[in-house]
Image (cartoon, rainbow, N blue to C red):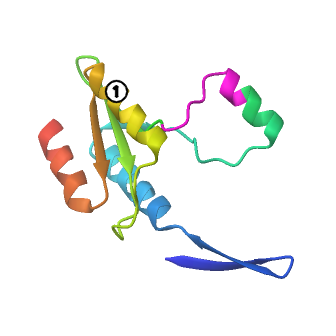
Amino acid sequence: MAYRVYFGGKKRIYNYAESNFQKQVVRYLKLNNIFCFSVPNGTKLKASQARIAKAEGMTAGVSDLIVLLPQGKAVFIELKNPNGKGVQSDNQKEFERVAGNLGFEYHIWENWDEVESFVKRVK
Protein backbone atom coordinates (compact mmCIF):
# COMPACT_ATOMS: atom_id res chain seq x y z
CA MET A 1 0.00 0.00 0.00
CA ALA A 2 1.45 3.38 -0.96
CA TYR A 3 0.87 6.57 0.94
CA ARG A 4 1.29 10.07 -0.47
CA VAL A 5 2.75 12.45 2.06
CA TYR A 6 3.38 16.14 1.43
CA PHE A 7 6.35 17.94 2.99
CA GLY A 8 7.03 21.56 2.13
CA GLY A 9 5.02 21.30 -1.09
CA LYS A 10 6.95 18.22 -2.25
CA LYS A 11 5.06 14.98 -2.77
CA ARG A 12 6.75 11.79 -1.58
CA ILE A 13 5.33 8.31 -1.92
CA TYR A 14 6.11 5.81 0.79
CA ASN A 15 5.41 2.12 0.42
CA TYR A 16 4.77 0.34 3.71
CA ALA A 17 3.97 -3.09 2.27
CA GLU A 18 7.26 -4.61 3.49
CA SER A 19 6.78 -3.08 6.93
CA ASN A 20 3.23 -4.44 7.16
CA PHE A 21 4.45 -7.86 6.02
CA GLN A 22 7.15 -7.81 8.71
CA LYS A 23 4.61 -6.89 11.41
CA GLN A 24 2.41 -9.82 10.36
CA VAL A 25 5.38 -12.20 10.30
CA VAL A 26 6.52 -11.16 13.78
CA ARG A 27 2.99 -11.55 15.16
CA TYR A 28 2.64 -15.02 13.57
CA LEU A 29 6.01 -16.21 14.85
CA LYS A 30 5.21 -15.01 18.37
CA LEU A 31 1.76 -16.66 18.26
CA ASN A 32 3.61 -19.89 17.48
CA ASN A 33 6.00 -19.36 20.43
CA ILE A 34 8.96 -18.68 18.16
CA PHE A 35 11.27 -16.03 19.60
CA CYS A 36 12.35 -13.36 17.15
CA PHE A 37 13.58 -9.81 17.19
CA SER A 38 14.21 -7.13 14.61
CA VAL A 39 17.38 -5.36 13.61
CA PRO A 40 16.35 -1.76 12.91
CA ASN A 41 19.02 -0.98 10.32
CA GLY A 42 16.54 0.97 8.20
CA THR A 43 15.97 3.55 10.92
CA LYS A 44 16.82 7.08 9.82
CA LEU A 45 19.48 8.55 12.09
CA LYS A 46 21.20 11.91 12.28
CA ALA A 47 24.84 11.81 11.16
CA SER A 48 26.12 11.95 14.74
CA GLN A 49 23.76 9.14 15.79
CA ALA A 50 24.81 7.04 12.79
CA ARG A 51 28.50 7.39 13.72
CA ILE A 52 27.76 6.23 17.27
CA ALA A 53 25.57 3.33 16.09
CA LYS A 54 28.25 2.17 13.64
CA ALA A 55 30.92 2.32 16.38
CA GLU A 56 28.58 0.27 18.60
CA GLY A 57 28.34 -2.45 15.94
CA MET A 58 25.48 -1.50 13.63
CA THR A 59 26.27 -3.21 10.33
CA ALA A 60 24.67 -2.55 6.96
CA GLY A 61 23.02 -5.58 5.40
CA VAL A 62 22.10 -7.45 8.57
CA SER A 63 18.82 -9.34 8.14
CA ASP A 64 15.50 -7.82 9.19
CA LEU A 65 14.75 -10.51 11.78
CA ILE A 66 16.74 -12.92 13.88
CA VAL A 67 14.96 -16.05 15.09
CA LEU A 68 16.34 -17.99 18.05
CA LEU A 69 15.55 -21.69 18.22
CA PRO A 70 16.40 -24.46 20.70
CA GLN A 71 19.86 -26.01 20.80
CA GLY A 72 21.55 -22.63 20.31
CA LYS A 73 20.35 -22.17 16.74
CA ALA A 74 19.92 -18.74 15.15
CA VAL A 75 18.16 -18.13 11.83
CA PHE A 76 18.46 -14.90 9.87
CA ILE A 77 15.40 -13.73 7.96
CA GLU A 78 15.39 -11.03 5.29
CA LEU A 79 11.92 -9.80 4.37
CA LYS A 80 11.07 -8.36 0.99
CA ASN A 81 8.02 -6.57 -0.27
CA PRO A 82 5.37 -9.18 -1.13
CA ASN A 83 4.80 -7.42 -4.47
CA GLY A 84 7.84 -9.28 -5.79
CA LYS A 85 9.85 -6.15 -6.55
CA GLY A 86 12.14 -6.26 -3.51
CA VAL A 87 15.79 -7.12 -4.17
CA GLN A 88 18.76 -7.67 -1.88
CA SER A 89 21.32 -4.92 -1.63
CA ASP A 90 25.00 -5.76 -2.05
CA ASN A 91 25.42 -5.43 1.75
CA GLN A 92 22.56 -7.90 2.31
CA LYS A 93 24.11 -10.38 -0.13
CA GLU A 94 27.42 -10.09 1.72
CA PHE A 95 25.72 -10.66 5.08
CA GLU A 96 23.96 -13.74 3.64
CA ARG A 97 27.33 -15.04 2.44
CA VAL A 98 29.00 -14.50 5.83
CA ALA A 99 26.09 -16.06 7.76
CA GLY A 100 26.07 -19.08 5.44
CA ASN A 101 29.84 -19.53 5.70
CA LEU A 102 29.49 -19.56 9.50
CA GLY A 103 26.84 -22.31 9.26
CA PHE A 104 23.71 -20.24 9.95
CA GLU A 105 20.42 -20.52 8.11
CA TYR A 106 19.47 -17.46 6.09
CA HIS A 107 16.10 -17.05 4.40
CA ILE A 108 14.51 -14.45 2.20
CA TRP A 109 10.77 -14.32 2.67
CA GLU A 110 8.50 -12.45 0.30
CA ASN A 111 5.29 -14.41 0.65
CA TRP A 112 3.22 -16.03 3.33
CA ASP A 113 3.82 -19.62 2.14
CA GLU A 114 7.52 -19.28 3.04
CA VAL A 115 6.62 -18.14 6.55
CA GLU A 116 4.14 -20.97 7.16
CA SER A 117 6.54 -23.56 5.79
CA PHE A 118 9.27 -22.39 8.17
CA VAL A 119 6.92 -22.47 11.19
CA LYS A 120 5.75 -26.01 10.36
CA ARG A 121 9.36 -27.16 9.98
CA VAL A 122 10.65 -25.75 13.28
CA LYS A 123 7.66 -26.61 15.51
Count of marks, rendered view: 1
- Magenta span: predominant SS is loop
Q: Residue at x 15, y 50 (%)?
A: 117
Q: Residue at x 33, y 31 (%)?
A: 97
User: In this view of the protein, which residue sits in the foreground, 1 or 71?
Assistant: 1
Q: Residue at x 41, y 50 (%)?
A: 88
Which quadrant of the structure image shows residue 34? top left
- Magenta-span inclusion, residue 60: yes
Instruction: Tell me the residue that label 1 is attached to.
Output: 99
Q: Residue at x 28, y 42 (%)?
A: 107
Q: Position of residue 75 (x, y in %)?
A: 30, 32
Residue 56 visible in the picture: yes
Q: On the picture, is 37 further left or further right than 103?
A: right
User: In this view of the protein, which residue sits in the foreground, 19 or 86?
Assistant: 86
- Outermost residue toward the front in this view: 90
How many residues crowd around disc 1 within 10 Å: few (fewer than 14), some, or many (20 or more)? some
Q: Position of residue 72 (x, y in %)?
A: 28, 17
- Magenta-span inclusion, residue 34: no
Q: Position of residue 11 (x, y in %)?
A: 73, 80
What kind of residue is marked 1? Ala
Where 82 falls versus 91 (above or below)? Answer: below
Which quadrant of the structure image shows residue 66? top left
Q: On the picture, is 27 further left or further right than 113?
A: right
- Outermost residue toward the left in this view: 121
Q: Position of residue 51 (x, y in %)?
A: 75, 30
Find the magenta span and give its range.
53-61
Where 90 falls versus 13 (above or below)? Answer: above
Where 59 falls versus 3 (above or below)? Answer: above
Q: On the picture, is 79 further left or further right than 5?
A: left
